[in-house]
Image (spheres, rainbow, N blue to C red):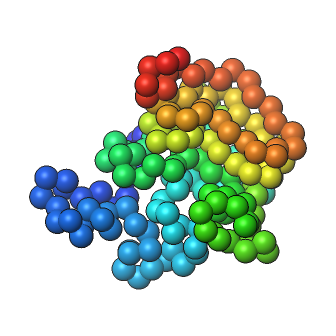
Amino acid sequence: MRNIFFSPGEPEFSAASHEELANAFNPMAVEGDVYYSNAFTLGYFSAICVEADDVTLLLNGYTIEQGPGHALLQRFFAIIYLASAPFIPAVGPLDFVGPNEFVSAKNFGVFGPGKLGLSSHHGIHGNNNENITVCGVTFEDFEVAAVSLNNVDGACFAVLVCVKDVFGVL
């Protein structure tokens, strides 16, 4: 098994055309378009998007992180996103999903040992979640926050380590 280095569609930057760079991380430009949802209009907003209840993620000593090129171009990103869209309905720069399409994760847990590494925004982000557990996880190289849960009902955090943010403030 290997660490996960999330950087889908990353071009060779020194040899890429302007069009290749513009569409490099655009899931809506992928041939065979499996990203049919407006949720991905702003690009790949997470490496892992949890849209189900009763999910447990065991890191088993591994790291999940955003690639540096992807972090440079995809500025709104969370390693783990606990909903089906980056914003709740009728909030944000456009309508990502309708009220009946938005799904928030419930009864989610992520357990270490392991690390959530480089992220241009959050390690874990969610909206309207219930019963979230984060235990034994190290957060490193995030730009905004290790964890941000809006309107959460029940959360348990234990043995978390925030080594540093990308600006070296911590």
The answer, for residue 74, to whether it is visible in the render is yes
> Residue 68: where, in percent of width, then height?
34, 42
Residue beneath the point at 61% across and 68% down: 94
> Residue 28: where, in percent of width, then height?
44, 74
**Rendered position, 17 above or below 59:** below
**Rendered position, 26 above or below 46:** below
> 167 left or right of 131?
left
**Rendered position, 86 above or below 37:** above
Please tell me which residue lies in front, 75 or 55. Answer: 75
Residue that sits furthest to the left in the current view: 15
The answer, for residue 61, to whether it is visible in the render is no
Residue beneath the point at 59% across and 47% down: 80
Residue that sits furthest to the bottom in the current view: 32
> Residue 40: where, in percent of width, then height?
53, 67
> 72 left or right of 156?
left
Residue 10: quadrant of the picture? bottom left
